[in-house]
Image (cartoon, helix red, strand yellow):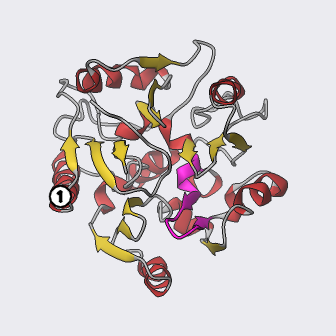
Amino acid sequence: MKIQIDNEWGELKRVVVGRGDDMGQAATLASAFDPTSHSHLTDGTYPDARDVDVQLKQLADVLVACGVEVQHPAGIPDLEQIFARDVGLVIEDRFFRSVMIGERQREWDGIQHLLDGLNIDVIPDHARMEGGDVLVLEHSIAVGVTRDPELTGLKTARTNQEAFDFLSSEFPHREVLGVELHKHDRNPLKCALHLDCAFMPLGRGEAMVCREAFLHAAQLDALIARFSHVIDISLTEAALLQSNLLHIDPETLLIDPRFTRISEILKKRGYRLIDVPMHHVGKMGGLFRCTTLPLLRD
């Protein structure tokens, strides 16, 4: 099976989409992985598994209608397998198995059968990395990394310096940019769980960004200097995951119809948008990019 990802916006040919048909035991405040889930559990608005499953199936149907080959993790009883992006990632023609937080390690068992025959790169044991923190740009790789000792112990600190160093050594021909994000285990307005919750490269050489989600202005400036135009989003929009979109091709994006302000901006800038409701999935802390693991882009 051919795999190839050279950037985040090339024409999507093959993708793994998460599944929501068996999420296991009901989530609790104690077991919540992220501040968005915790907030909805507190408010009594955490989604039902059936509603999540319906939206993921709608997402898969839209992708198939766009000519994309869709694969799914194997069903594992009593296991949440919604956010396929974090289990692994493709950079160029290599597949890297992530080292996720302990509660999510079993998710690998659901996708490994899809990768038969591939050589799987495993990052070092002391490194931690989830796919939502790694974005492949034209000639570089952007990595959301947690370095601050006061933040590294948080459950929302998913990618560490060791993972950043590993990617830097594996791709010496690409500049690997480390950017640090605000982290908080309970407040979604004070936390970008992954880099793709605050930053999104677009196919016309542009980007979306929530500036307030970044710890260091100099790091952010170095990142966005690569783009011809930047669309700013607020902390509230970032918390609703309005940067967590998915390119079908350089001109086409999947977006939640709730995101009216961003939709208007993107349309005016020449993008074609396909509305796919994902409001139930979003209550669990992820959206389009989080639920999909691209394997092949042209």
What kind of residue is marked 1? Gln
Asked if the magenta segment contains residue 195, the reply would be yes
Q: Tell me if residue 66 comes above or below residue 139 in the rendering.
A: below
For label 1, count other residues whose C-alpha is less than 10 Å away and answer few (under 14), some (14-19) or many (20+): some
Viewer-proximal residue among 189 and 287: 287
Which residue is drawn at the image coordinates 55% and 46% (left, top)? Answer: 136
In the rendered structure, the answer to whether residue 21 lies left or right of residue 179 reads: left
Q: Residue at x 47, y 87 (%)?
A: 268
Q: Answer whether residue 44 is visible to the viewer in this image.
A: no
* Res 262 seen here: yes
- 144 magenta-colored: no
Looking at the figure, which quarter contains the N terminus?
top left
> Which residues lie in the magenta part?
192-209
Please give left or right for residue 216 compared with residue 171 in the image: right
SS state under label 1: helix
Q: Position of residue 166 (x, y in %)?
A: 65, 23
Horizontally, is 227 left or right of 17 in the view?
A: right
Residue 237 location (% of width, % of height): 53, 68
Q: What residue is pinned by disc 1? A: 58
Q: Going 16% across and 52% down the picture, which residue do you hit?
A: 57
